[in-house]
Each structure stands twice: as structure tokens, then as C-alpha cells.
Image (spheres, grey):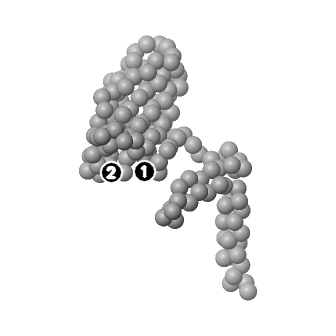
Amino acid sequence: MLALLPRLTLALIAAVLILLCEVAVDVTGRVASVSARGLPSSLIDAPTRTSDDEVSLEEIGKVKRGKEHVLVVGQVGDSGLVCKLKLKYADGNADSPDDVISDKDGICVMFFDVPDRRSVAGDAIAKLRVETTRGKFKGKTSQGFTVKP
């Protein structure tokens, strides 16, 4: 009986987590989405927002205004996809570097220049939209970063 206690404890923990989260499963049995309703915000680490598990952006961190050739790496899960990056700065202005095509490993390597205006200092956001070469939407994600004065 004591040998079953660890298994029972794990099963109870899993049951409580499932009750706290809404889990949607698609026809193939794959988890389609998870909602963190009811979980304390300290348990939810969400620096990025994603519409697809295969689309993500690496952390940009803090960059100084006026910095050139800031590297942005997106993982899109497949080769030959179009990566469209849009940057929004604290002053409300936006910038869109040239679109790139993902490499054989499903990686998009993009660069952008941070404007030198004082008004761009503060919180900014990088939004990545991924499409096929024919324009079919595949996924999107966003990543916050900071522009230092």
C-alpha cells in the first residue's frame, strides 16, 4: 500500500492542475490549447504571447537606443516560411524590417536598427507573424523588450 502512495500523490496533483486549467484537445488527441484560468499569476510565466507552439521568439532583452543590427531569432518549426517582424516602440511608432524566409531548420534570423530618438526609450514589443509563401497564416508570437535611453 505504501508503494502506491507516490503514484496516488502525483495523480491527485495532476487532477488538481487539470481542474484549474481548461485543456482543449483536437481530433488527433494533441493538446490544442491550455487556458490558465484559476492559476495564480506567479505560476504563469508569460513574457511572450504565442498562437502556435511551433512559433517562438528568443528573448531580445535590453537594447540601447540608436543600436544597429539587433539580432532577433524566431523559431517557426518549418523551412520556407515567411517571417514578418513588426516592432512597436514606447512612443507609438512602429517599424517593419524586411521579411525573411526560414532556413532548413525552421529558424528565421532577422536584424533591426533601434531608432535614436529619445522618445523610443521604454517598453517595446516585437511581433512575429509567420505565413507560407502564398500568404496562408501559420502562427504568430510577440516578445517584449526594453529600449534603454
* Residue 101 visible in the shown view: yes
Q: Nearer the viewer, residue 63 or 93?
A: 93
* Place of residue 140 in the rendered image (x, y in percent of width and height, measured from the top left): 45, 40
Instruction: Say whether residue 82 is left or right of residue 45.
Output: left
Badge 1 marks a residue whose secondary structure is loop
Which residue in the structure is indicated by mark 2? 78
Q: Is residue 27 above or below residue 67?
A: below
Q: Is residue 44 above or below residue 128?
A: below
Asked if the residue under mark 2 is in contact with the one under mark 1, i.e. CB atoms within 8 Å, the reply is yes
* Place of residue 75 in the rendered image (x, y in percent of width and height, measured from the top left): 38, 46
Q: Is residue 36 above or below residue 148?
A: below
How would you rate the neighbour count of disc 1 (Cα within 10 Å): few for under 14, some for 14-19, many for 20 or more? some
Q: Which residue corresponds to the image point at 51% horizontal and 16% vertical from the top-left?
A: 91
| Residue type at tag 2 | Asp
Q: Which residue corresponds to the image point at 67% horizontal and 61% vertical from the top-left?
A: 18
Instruction: Give residue 18's mark.
Output: none
Q: Which residue corresponds to the image point at 65% horizontal and 55% vertical from the top-left?
A: 22
* Residue 61 visible in the shown view: no
- Alpha-carbon distance for marks 1 and 2? 9 Å
Q: Is residue 125 above or below residue 66?
A: below
Badge 2 marks a residue whose secondary structure is loop
* Place of residue 104 in the rendered image (x, y in percent of width and height, measured from the top left): 26, 50
Instruction: Give residue 54's mark.
Output: 1
* Place of residue 89 in the rendered image (x, y in percent of width and height, measured from the top left): 48, 22
Q: Which residue corresponds to the image point at 66% horizontal and 55% vertical from the top-left?
A: 21
Q: Which badge, 1 or 2, is on the more N-terminal residue?
A: 1
Quadrant in which the N terminus is drawn: bottom right
Which residue of the protein is positioned furthest toward the bottom in this rendering?
1
